[in-house]
Image (spheres, rainbow, N blue to C red):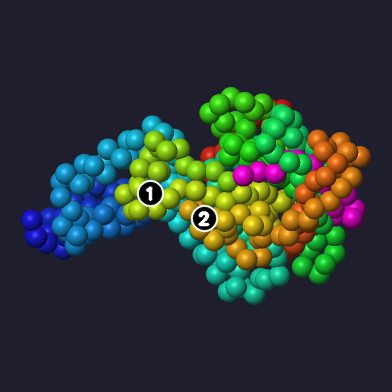
C-alpha cells in the first residue's frame, strides 16, 4: 500500500479519542495513567503499520494470535520468551546502580510457574513428595546474609523446580505430581542457613502446540530452558529477591529462550555420599551450595515487590 497516514490530523484525533487521552476522569470514568499508556502503545502500533506497511491480513493474523495466546494461558510464558521479563530486570539493575546499590545476589526472572502456599519448615525441608525414578537426589543449601556478610535470621526462602520430565507440580499435564511436589519454603534460623532435600531437575520446553512456540517458530527460535531452580527470598529488613540458578553443565545454559542465565547464578555441583542418613533415595547424591545475599531497603521501602497474578493453593 505504501501510504503514510500516521501523522495526519484524522489519525492523531482517532488515537486521542480511542484512548480518551485528556478526557474527563471524574466519576470513575477512566484512569489517566491507563489512558497515557494505551495512547502510547496504540500510537506505536499504528506507526508500525505505517512504517512497515503491515497489511490488513497481517493485522488480523496478529489479532487471532492474541486470541490463541489467551486461550492457551501463555501470556506470562511469552513475556519471558520475547525478553520482556528480562528487560524489566535490566531496568531494575540500572535503577540499583543509579542509587549505588550493589553486592547482592543477582536477580533474574520469576517465570510463570510459581505457586503460593507451600508449607513452611524451619531450616530444612524435604520437598520430593512423589517418586521419580529418573531423578537422582539433590541437596540445595546455603546461607542468607546481608551485604556485610551477617546472617539474616527469619528470612523466608521459597524454592520450586521441575521434575525429570520438565514438568512442575500444579502445571503437570500428565497429572503425575501431587500437591507441592518439588516446591517448598524454609525459614532461616539465627545462622541464616536453609536447606532443601529434593531431586535433580531437568530443563523444559514450551508446549509444542502452544501460542508461545508458534511465535518462536516464526522467529526461527527454540523454546527450551536449561535445568534450573527458582527462588523467592523475603525478609522484613531487606528487599525481596527473585532469582534462580542453572544446573552446572547443562548444554543450554547460555542458550536459554527466557534469557535468565547470569554468570553468578551457576553454582558448582558436588558429588557427595551420606544421603541415606538424610532420608534421601540413595546414599550418593548431588550437593549445590547457593549462598544468598540480600540488599537493604530503599528509604525503608522494598522496591522489588512485583504485583502480578500468581497461582495459590493450600498444602
Please provide percent x and percent y for residue 21.
Answer: 29, 53
- Crowding at dot 2, Cα within 10 Å, few <14 / some 14-19 / many 20+, comes out as some
Q: Nearer the viewer, residue 126 or 90?
A: 126
Please provide percent x and percent y for residue 158.
Answer: 71, 45
Residue depicted at x 86% and y 36%: 279
Residue depicted at x 74% and y 56%: 269
Quadrant hosting residue 127: top right
Q: Is residue 306 visible?
A: no
Region rendered in magenta: 189-202
Q: Nearer the viewer, residue 106 or 228?
A: 228
Residue marked by disc 2: 256
Q: Where, quadrant-wise, is the C terminus in this rendering?
A: top right
Q: CA distance from mark 1 to mark 2?
A: 13 Å
Q: Is residue 197 visible?
A: yes
Q: Where, quadrant-wise, is the N terminus in this rendering?
A: bottom left
Please provide percent x and percent y for residue 110.
Answer: 58, 49
Is 25 a magenta residue? no
- Crowding at dot 1, Cα within 10 Å, few <14 / some 14-19 / many 20+, comes out as some
- Regarding mark 2 in the picture, which secondary structure is present there? loop
Residue depicted at x 16% and y 63%: 7
Residue marked by disc 1: 216
Amino acid at each position: 500500500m505504501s501510504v503514510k497516514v500516521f501523522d495526519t490530523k484524522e489519525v492523531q484525533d482517532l488515537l486521542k479519542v480511542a484512548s480518551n487521552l485528556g478526557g474527563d476522569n471524574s466519576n470513575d470514568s477512566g484512569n489517566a495513567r491507563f489512558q497515557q499508556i494505551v495512547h502510547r502503545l496504540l500510537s506505536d502500533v499504528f506507526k508500525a503499520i505505517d512504517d512497515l506497511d503491515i497489511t490488513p491480513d497481517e493485522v488480523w493474523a496478529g489479532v487471532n494470535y492474541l486470541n490463541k495466546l489467551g486461550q492457551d494461558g501463555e501470556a506470562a510464558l511469552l513475556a519471558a520468551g520475547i525478553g520482556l521479563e528480562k528487560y524489566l530486570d535490566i531496568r531494575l539493575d540500572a535503577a540499583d546502580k543509579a542509587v549505588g546499590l550493589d553486592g547482592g545476589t543477582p536477580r533474574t526472572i520469576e517465570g510463570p510457574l510459581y505457586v503460593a502456599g507451600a508449607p513452611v519448615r524451619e531450616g530444612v525441608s524435604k520437598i520430593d513428595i512423589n517418586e521419580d525414578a529418573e531423578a537422582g537426589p539433590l541437596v540445595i543449601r546455603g546461607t542468607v546474609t546481608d551485604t556485610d556478610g551477617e546472617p539474616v535470621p527469619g528470612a523466608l526462602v521459597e524454592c520450586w523446580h521441575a521434575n525429570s520430565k520438565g514438568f512442575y507440580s500444579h502445571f503437570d499435564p500428565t497429572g503425575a505430581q501431587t500437591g507441592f511436589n518439588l516446591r517448598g519454603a524454609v525459614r532461616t534460623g539465627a545462622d541464616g542457613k536453609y536447606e532443601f532435600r529434593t531431586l535433580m531437575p531437568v530443563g523444559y520446553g514450551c508446549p509444542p502446540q502452544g501460542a508461545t512456540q508458534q511465535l518462536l517458530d516464526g522467529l526461527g527460535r527454540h523454546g527450551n530452558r536449561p535445568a534450573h531452580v527458582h527462588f523467592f527470598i523475603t525478609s522484613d529488613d531487606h528487599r525481596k529477591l527473585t532469582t534462580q540458578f542453572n544446573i552446572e553443565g547443562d548444554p543450554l545454559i547460555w542458550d536459554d529462550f527466557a534469557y535468565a542465565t547470569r554468570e553468578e547464578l551457576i553454582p558448582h555441583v558436588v558429588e557427595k555420599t551420606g544421603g541415606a542418613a538424610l532420608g534421601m533415595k540413595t546414599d550418593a547424591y548431588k550437593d549445590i551450595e547457593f549462598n544468598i545475599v540480600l540488599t537493604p531497603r530503599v528509604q525503608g521501602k522494598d522496591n522489588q515487590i512485583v504485583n502480578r497474578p500468581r497461582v495459590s493453593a493450600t498444602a
